[in-house]
Amino acid sequence: MVTDIDAGRRWSESMPAAYERYLVPVLFRPFAEDLAARAGALRPQRILELAAGTGVLTSELLAKAPSAVVTASDLNTAMVDFGSARVPGAVWRQADAQRLSFPDGSFDLVICQFGVMFFPDRVAAFTEVRRVLAPGGRFLFNTWGPLEAHGFDAAVQAALERAFPVDPPRFLPTLPHGYADPAVVAADLAGADFTVEEEQELTLQGRAASAADVATGFLTGTPVRAAVEERGDGPAVRATIMEEMTARLGEGPVTAPMTAYVFRSAA
């Protein structure tokens, strides 16, 4: 059996394109613009991005910090291949955040958008981040808030629970929204000898062409796909999910609030 945690760390070659088309503009670009602006204000010259995915933050970093050398990395080679083609201005590397293959003190800034939740051992990963940072370097990242504070993800989870009332996929509450206590995040940073300089709760609006587009993104471009397929994917299941999402979010173009936490820490 594929657990939701296992699936959360596995991305097939076909998923990045769907992720980029349906989810990036809605869920991730608003926060990428915010995080890149914060990064640019620090005036870094050497940036390492972790969990870069398809490159939405990468492209914003190149615009907001044009004098910096940006190294974008991801654990999944499918994402690295897609991102390097989409954002060739960065140096792309396959990398495990818990075993970074960079020398000590290589970067002024390490940045990560909605990736730290997926690290199996966060203190170990944060310790690696601190190692590759130069003295006084910063670690800047965001993490999703509670599931119920994210209009799109909460609707997806409700739809999955309607489609699978006995054993619904738990990917969303377990991984993307499984690191939603700022006190726990701050403690993990302290465990890696970081000093938290700033912690902010941030709510932005996501806008999608339709609830069906968001559902399609999750069903084809995220590990929800594997969890649904394992439980008996089919037209009836997909129709139920689409129907529930539309009932919750509305017909036509839809807007929903999304809450995250932003942390800036110093090495």
Image (cartoon, rainbow, N blue to C red):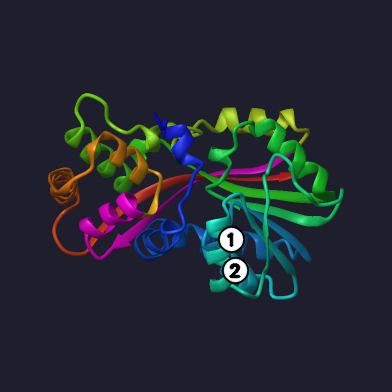
Residue at 75 percent across and 69 percent down: it is 69
Residue 120: percent from left, percent from top: 59, 33
Q: Quadrant of the N terminus?
A: top left
Q: Which residues are magenta?
A: 195-220
Amino acid of disc 1: Val
Residue 207: percent from left, percent from top: 31, 62
Residue at 26 percent across and 60 percent down: it is 213
Q: Relative to 197, does residue 174 appear above or below in the rendering?
A: above
Q: Which residue is mark 2?
A: 84
Q: Secondary structure at mark 2?
A: helix
Magenta-colored stretch includes residue 207: yes
Residue at 36 percent across and 42 percent down: it is 226
Mark linked to residue 233: none
Mark linked to residue 80: 1
Magenta-colored stretch includes residue 67: no
Q: Quadrant of the C terminus?
A: top right
Whether residue 150 is visible: no
Whether residue 206 is visible: yes
Spot the residue most to the top.
166
Residue toward you, 21 or 150: 21
Amino acid of disc 2: Ser
Q: Are marks 2 and 1 in contact (CB under 8 Å)?
A: yes
Crowding near pointer 1: few (<14 within 10 Å), some, many (20+)?
Answer: many
